[in-house]
Image (tube, rainbow, N blue to C red):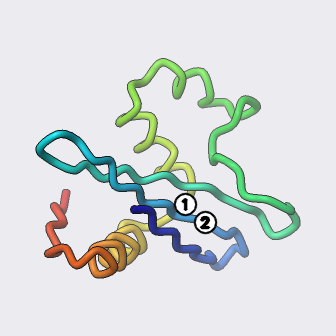
Amino acid sequence: MTHEKIFTLKTGRSIKVIIHEIKKTDDSEINIDVLIKEPKEPEFRLPISDCHPKYWKLKRLNQQHASKLQLQYSGIKKKQIRSAMNEFYAANNWANIMHHN
């Protein structure tokens, strides 16, 4: 199952949050991806691409840490991520099991 939600920041930047459920043998895992689009850009893109100063740092990280770095550089707030997660849980009839860090 996949859920997408787009947020628009005060700066005009649009952020697309994509939440995927990854089924495993006995359990499910949630993966969060984020894409950004500046007001004059035609398409969404990764926050840290190959021309970004943190790109090579990102390439050295494992997937979980790389995903956190992408979230951090997107400009999205934890509240917005929680909102998208709650919608994902509601759409899938799951109990809201958010762990607040």
Q: Measure the alpha-carbon separation of dots 2 and 1.
A: 8 Å
Neighbourhood count class around disc 2 (C-alpha, 10 Å): few under 14, some 14–19, many 20 upward: many
The residue at the point 33 percent across, 79 percent down is 91
Q: Residue 36 at what x, y percent from top left?
A: 66, 58
Q: Earlier in the sequence, mark 2 or mark 1?
A: 2
The label on residue 62 is none
What residue is at 54 percent from the left and 22 percent from the top? 59
Q: Quadrant of residue 8?
A: bottom right
Q: Is residue 87 left or right of residue 27?
A: right
11 or 21: which is nearer to us? 21
Q: Judge whether 78 appears above or below 51 on screen.
A: below
Q: Position of residue 77 (x, y in %)?
A: 43, 67
Residue visible at 50% across and 60% down in the picture: 18
Name of the residue lying farthest toward the front: 25
96 sits left or right of 69 in the view: left
Please name the amino acid that badge 2 sits on: Ile
Type of residue at label 1?
Gly
Residue tagged by mark 1?
Answer: 75
* Kind of element beneath mark 2: strand
Q: Position of residue 28 (x, y in %)?
A: 21, 50
Residues at discs 2 and 1 in contact (Cβ within 8 Å): yes
Q: Is residue 84 left or right of residue 75?
A: left
For the N terminus, the quadrant is bottom left
Count of numbered tags: 2
